[in-house]
Amino acid sequence: MNTHIRFILFGAMCSALPLQARETDTLLIEAEQFSERGGWQVDTQFIETMGSPYLLAHGMGECVADASTSITVPGDGSYKVWARTMDWTEALEREGGAGRFSLSIGGTQVGGELGKGKGEWHWEEAGSISLKQGQTTLSLKDLSGFDGRVDAVLLSRSQGLRPPEKCLLEDRIAWKIPGAPLAVEDAGDFDLVVIGGGYGGLGAAISAARMGCKVALVQNREVLGGNGSSEVRVWAKGDLPPSEYLMADIVREISDSAQASPAAAEQFVDAKKEAVVKAEKNITLLLGHHAYGLEMKGEEIAAAKLLEVKTGKIKRVKGRLFADCTGHGFIGQWAGADLTMERKGRMGMSNMWMWKAEASPRSFREEPWMIDLSEKGFPYPQRHHAEWFWEGGFDSHPIKELEQTRDWNLLASYSAWNAIKNHGVYANRDPQEHANAKLQWLAYVGGTRETQQLIGDVVLSDADIEEKKEFPDACVLTTWSIDLHIPHPVYTKENPDRPFISKDIHRHAVDKRVGYPIPYRCFYSRNVPNLFMAGRNISVTREALGTIRVMKTIGMMGVAVGRAAAICKVHACLPRDVYRDHLDEVKTLWRMPGKQRFDSIDELRKSLGESTASTK
Ligand SMILES: Cc1cc2nc3c(=O)[nH]c(=O)nc-3n(C[C@H](O)[C@H](O)[C@H](O)COP(=O)(O)OP(=O)(O)OC[C@H]3O[C@@H](n4cnc5c(N)ncnc54)[C@H](O)[C@@H]3O)c2cc1C
C-alpha cells in the first residue's frame, strides 16, 4: 500500500493555492519516496535552493535500473502529467541534455524523453494519459546514465491546472494537495539537539550522551560521518597529541584507518560509527532527517523543523540547546547568528573518483556536452584515484550555486575520463589498460570545505595561532598546517572560467607533535544564546579554518561541546555561562576519559560535587 501518498479532493481549498485548479483531483508524488528506487540515488544536498530531496540516476555512463512506486488514481479520466526536473548540462551552458529519462504509468510511457532543454528546476509537461480509478504503477526509466534527476511527479485531471512555481519545502506544505507534506509530528524534547552527523556532530552527540544528556542527532544522509563517510571518502586526519584533556578518546572510537582517500567504501567504517552511536541509550538517532527550518523563542532556538526524507513526514524536535554541525552553518544562519562568508576565492567542493582495470574491454560513451580535455587540463589520476584536488566552485556561491558546482565537478570528471578512455595522450599512455578501464566510483555527494563561519565570543585568527596566543579556555588541539586551496595555476589555463583542479598552499604554523589549543569560545554563537557549533563552521577566520578543518580535530571540538552541554544542563545555564562561571568544572569533564559514563545528569552532578569536594 502506498502509505506515503494521500488522496483528498481539494477543490474548495484551491483558491488559496498557486495551483490554478478547482474541483479537480491532483496528486503529487515525491520521487525520493518511491518504494523501489532501482539504481536511482536520493540526493539531499540542495534542498535549501531547489526545495526537496530528489532522485538522481547516477550511472556514470550506464543506465541505472528503473525506479517505481504504486500510486492510487483518484478517479477515471484523462490526467496531465508533469515531472519536476532540470537539464543540468544546459545549466552549465553545455548543450546535449546529459540526464534524460522517461516516465510511465501503468506500463504506458507518458510523453517522450524528459530532462532535456531547460537549465533550471521546472515542471516539465510529459503529456496526458487516460487512467482508471485505483492502484497502478508509476516508474522512471533512466535513458542516459548521466545523472538525470526527478524531484516530483504531478498528475491532475484539471485542464486549467498550472503547477506551482515556488517549490521550497515551506511552499509545498502550503500547497495542501494530496502528497504534499501535512501535519507536524512531535519528534521529542531533548537537552541537546545536534544537527549534522559528521565528525563534529558525532563527537558532540556521543560525549553529551555519555555525560547523561538526552540527545537527538539529526543527519540528512542514511550514513554518519559527513565527508568522512563512504559517500564522500575523505580520510580522517589531524594528530591527537598528548593533552591534559582526553577529547581524543571518542575520536579514536569513530575514526577510520583508511589506506587512501578515496578508497573502497568499507575503509570509511560507516557501520562502526553507527554502532558507537546506537550503543548510547541517551541518543535518539534521526538518520535520513533533514533540518529545514527553526522555531525561535526570542533570541533562542526552540525547535528545529525536520523532513523525514523517505516518508515526507514533517517533524518538530525541541531542545534546550542546539549544536550546528552542518558544516554549512545553516542552523546559525536561520537563527540569525552573526556570521561571515568569504565573497570569492573560497576553497571549493570535491567529487572524488576511482577507476579500475577489468579483465576485458569496457567502453565509455563520448557525449556532446563533455568538454574537450587534453593532458594540459588535468593531472593523470595516479593509483587510479582522482583525489582531493579535483575541486571546483571557488568563486561560486557556496549555497545558492552549490548544485552547479557539484554538476561542474561531475562534468569535468566525465570529460577527463573520456580523454583517458577515448583519445589523447593519456589514453595512449597504456592503451591496453585504458581499454579495459571502468569508472568504478564517482561521488555524487560532494565534499565541501568552506561555506560560512558563525561568530563566537572569540574569532580565532592565524595570527593568534602563529603568536601562540594563550586563552584561558584553550582546549582542542589543532595540528594541521594552515592549508588553503586555490585554482591550480597550470591546469586552470585550459578552463580559466571554471577551474576544477586545485593547488594547496600550506603555512606550517603549528608543531603537530604539540598542537595549538583552540579556545572554547569559538564553539558557541555570540548572539544566539543556546547555539553551539562544532565543525568547519566554527568561529575562526578563513586562514585559521585552514588548520582546524581536519576531521580528528573537528571530532574533538564535538567532544568539548558535548561536555559543555552537560555543564549547561547541570546548572541550567547557557554556553557562554560555561566559560564565564563554570570553566573549572567543564575542564574537569574535558579531563575525563572518553568511556566515562553517567546515566543521568543527577549522577554527573553528584560526581562533580564529589570531585569539587575532594579537591578543596
Ligand atoms: C575532498 C576533501 C578532502 C579533504 N581532506 C581531508 C583529509 O585528508 N583529512 C581530514 O581530516 N579532513 C579533510 N578535509 C576536510 C574535512 O573533510 C571537513 O572539514 C570536515 O568533514 C568537516 O566536518 P563537519 O563535521 O563540520 O562537516 P561534514 O563532514 O560536512 O558533516 C556535516 C554533515 O551534516 C549533514 N547536514 C548538513 N546540513 C544538514 C541539515 N540541514 N540537516 C541534517 N543534516 C545536515 C551533511 O549531510 C553532512 O553529512 C577534506 C575535505 C574535502 C572536501
Image (tube, grey):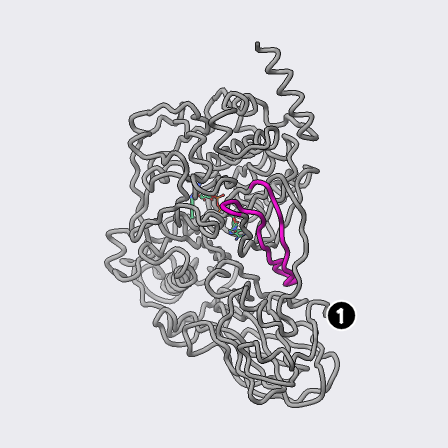
Asked whether the viewer can see residue 560, the reply is yes
Residue 509 or 29: which is nearer the viewer? 29
User: Magenta segment: does it hold 437?
Assistant: no
Residue 348: x %, y % from top left: 37, 52
Q: Quadrant of residue 548?
A: top left
Residue 396 vertical position relative to residue 522 in the rendered view, above or below: below
Residue 66 or 522: which is nearer the viewer? 522
Number of numbered tags placed on the structure image = 1
Q: Give, as a single range, the part of the protein colored magenta.
A: 298-321
**Residue occupying image coordinates x 46% and y 24%:** 241
Residue 25: x %, y % from top left: 66, 82
**Residue occupying image coordinates x 47% and y 68%:** 363
Q: Is the residue marked by circle 1 packed among few (<14), some (14-19), or many (20+) residues within 10 Å?
A: few
The residue beneath circle 1 is 1
Q: Is residue 443 left or right of residue 202?
A: left
Residue 453: x %, y % from top left: 39, 44
Q: Main secondary structure of the magenta part?
A: strand
Residue 141 vertical position relative to residue 473 in the rendered view, above or below: below
Residue 569: x %, y % from top left: 61, 32
Screen quadrant of the N terminus: bottom right
User: Magenta segment: does it hold 307?
Assistant: yes
Residue 614 or 93: which is nearer the viewer? 614
**Residue occupying image coordinates x 36% and y 26%:** 511
Q: Amino acid at mark 1?
A: Met
Q: Is residue 179 left or right of residue 526?
A: right
Residue 468 or 160: which is nearer the viewer? 160
Screen quadrant of the C terminus: top right
**Residue occupying image coordinates x 43% and y 26%:** 474
Q: Quadrant of residue 153?
A: bottom right
Tag 1's secondary structure? loop
